[in-house]
């Protein structure tokens, strides 16, 4: 019912799962991941116990192939299951039971496992794997979605489309640093779920990604003047010596607080401010 990719970033800091299916809310059932531990996708006639049990094994340092072997050996219905696992190090592993609906199968490599069932053919898993391998220059979450899109374009689930999900974990990578869940997005019921998942990831990246220190602009001079004018046009007048207090107030309402840096402004925030404010001519020297 599903095709998925489980993967680890090259530096081992990120683990993630991306999945699509002609099944309601596949993202609620298939993926599981723990930061710097591993990730897995449990699918076909899914055994939900694989998720906590698999992560427990990965936390003890068990290799991906041994996790697959342990979970399936203890499961009398294993021939109806499909499973992909990636550990903190080493190659990924995949299991496809003999009773899974065709086409069903998987491919694995260093730090990744691609698998699917009820697919149009092996070209779907091949496209998943090939796109993952070719996408090394993309940010990790975008790379996962690009691979999923390639699998869909190659044929995907032979019954059609319904849902998609993306889970990415990183130590301290969650909102405000309070969790390890960097991205957790689901499209539960949609005629084009992978396109919608990509749209949600774009919004998530704008709102919640941390700013790149190399691109930050000093909140002074012409930049500060423009920011003050834009904020004033939006009903956030600047009081005192600079626009930082008004900027923080506005950014909080726009859910951009993760991109705030004292004394500076993220170009992503400035671009959004320019987009939503009534037209205010920018000073020539502002970036």
Image (tube, rainbow, N blue to C red):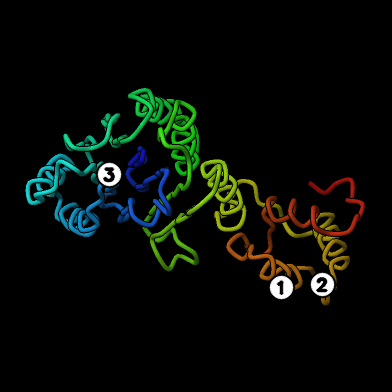
User: In the structure shown, which secondary structural element does the residue marked by tag 1 occupy?
Assistant: helix
Tag 1–tag 2 contact (CB < 8 Å): yes
Mark count: 3
Q: Which residue is mark 2?
A: 236
Tell me the CA gap for discs 1 and 3: 48 Å
User: In the structure shown, which secondary structural element does the residue marked by tag 3 occupy?
Assistant: strand
Residue 16 locus on image (x, y percent): 37, 47
Above or below residue 74? Residue 230 is below
Which class describes the residues within 10 Å of circle 1: few (<14), some (14-19), or many (20+)?
few
Q: Choose the circle earlier in sequence order: 1 or 2.
A: 2
The N terminus - image quarter: top left
Q: Residue at x 82, y 66 (%)?
A: 231
- Between marks 1 and 3 in the image, the one whose residue lies nearer the viewer: 3
Q: Residue furthest bottom?
A: 240
Tell me the CA gap for discs 2 and 3: 53 Å
Q: Which residue is mark 1?
A: 249
The disc label shown at residue 44, or none:
3
Examine the rendering and report whether any part of residue 109 can be seen.
no
Above or below residue 149? Residue 19 is below
* Occupied quadrant, residue 209: bottom right
- Between marks 2 and 3 in the image, the one whose residue lies nearer the viewer: 3
Which class describes the residues within 10 Å of circle 3: few (<14), some (14-19), or many (20+)?
many
Q: Residue at x 27, y 29 (%)?
A: 107
Along the line of sight, the residue nearer the viewer: 167 or 237: 167
């Amino acid at each position: 019912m599903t095709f998925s990719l489980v993967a680890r970033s090259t530096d081992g800091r990120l683990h993630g799962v991306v999945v699509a299916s002609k099944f309601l809310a596949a993202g609620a059932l298939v993926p599981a991941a723990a930061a710097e531990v591993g990730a897995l996708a449990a699918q076909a006639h899914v055994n939900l116990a694989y998720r906590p049990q698999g992560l427990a094994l990965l936390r003890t340092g068990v290799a991906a192939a041994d996790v697959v072997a342990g979970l399936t050996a203890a499961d009398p219905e294993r021939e109806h299951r499909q499973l992909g696992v990636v550990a903190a190090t080493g190659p990924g592993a995949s299991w496809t039971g003999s009773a899974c609906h065709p086409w069903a199968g998987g491919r694995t490599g260093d730090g990744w496992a691609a698998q699917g069932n009820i697919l149009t053919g092996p070209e779907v898993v091949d496209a998943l794997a090939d796109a993952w391998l070719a996408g090394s220059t993309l940010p990790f979450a975008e790379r996962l979605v690009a691979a999923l899109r390639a699998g869909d374009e190659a044929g995907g689930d032979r019954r059609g489309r319904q849902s998609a999900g993306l889970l990415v974990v990183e130590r301290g990578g969650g909102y405000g640093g309070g969790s390890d869940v960097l991205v957790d997005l689901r499209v539960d019921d949609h005629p084009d779920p992978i396109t919608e998942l990509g749209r949600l990831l774009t919004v998530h990246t704008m709102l919640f990604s941390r700013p790149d220190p190399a691109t930050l602009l000093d909140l002074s001079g012409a930049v500060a003047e423009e920011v003050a004018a834009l904020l004033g046009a939006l009903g956030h007048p600047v009081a005192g010596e600079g626009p930082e207090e008004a900027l923080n107030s506005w950014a909080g309402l726009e859910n951009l607080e993760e991109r705030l840096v004292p004394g500076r402004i993220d170009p992503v925030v400035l671009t959004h401010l320019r987009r939503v404010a009534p037209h205010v001519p920018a000073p020539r020297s502002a970036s």
